[in-house]
Amino acid sequence: MTTAKQAHDLLDNPLLQIFPGRGMTCVLDPNKALCQLFGTENSTRRAPDQDDCRPQCQNLAFTDANITDFQTRADRLREVVADPLAPSLRTARDRHELDRIEKIIRRHHYGK
């Protein structure tokens, strides 16, 4: 893009719908969405129900800002799982979440 008009046209494109969220960004393709969608079936301006977001959805994208949020969350979880006095059920749940977040971070940085 070399002009403001091109940027405006890109952002106004009904086929390109980006919905930033906490920890993820939805680049909506209604045909691939696993969540509920707002709007009518034939509308070019449908919106995802981000409260129904699912980790397996192909519309998910992670920006650098999303990854920074994940890194902060992972740091907090590392403290919790390292606490020898934490209940084992909580430690197991938080270890599972930490593993999931670390996988997202690795995939973002290294494509693995």
Image (cartoon, grey):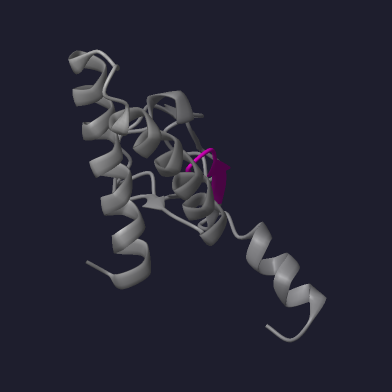
Q: Position of residue 57 (x, y in %)?
A: 29, 43
- Asked if the stretch drawn in magenta spans residue 23, the answer is yes
82 or 40, which lies in front?
A: 82
Q: In which quarter of the image is the N terminus?
A: bottom right
Q: Position of residue 50 (x, y in %)?
A: 47, 30
Q: Viewed as shown, does residue 87 lie left or right of 14?
A: left
Farthest-out residue, front = 84
State the residue at coordinates (51%, 50%).
66
Q: Where is residue 80 in the image (x, y as percent from the top left)?
A: 36, 28
Q: Where is residue 100 in the image (x, y as percent from the top left)?
A: 26, 42
State the residue at coordinates (48%, 42%).
23
Q: Viewed as shown, does residue 93 lie left or right of 101?
A: left
Farthest-out residue, right = 4
10 or 92, which lies in front?
A: 92
Q: Could you tell me how many numbered marks the image carries?
A: 0
- Asked if the stretch drawn in magenta spans residue 20, the answer is yes
Q: Quadrant of the C terminus?
A: bottom left
Q: Which residue range is magenta in the image?
A: 18-24
Residue 55: tell me if it is visible: no
88 or 25, which lies in front?
A: 88
Among the 4 quarters of the image, the one containing residue 105:
bottom left
Among the 4 quarters of the image, the one containing residue 107:
bottom left
48 or 46, which lies in front?
A: 48
Residue 22: tell me if it is visible: yes
State the residue at coordinates (51%, 29%).
39
Q: Is the magenta stretch mostly helix, strand or loop?
A: strand
Is 79 located above or below residue 104 in the figure? Answer: above
State the residue at coordinates (37%, 68%).
109
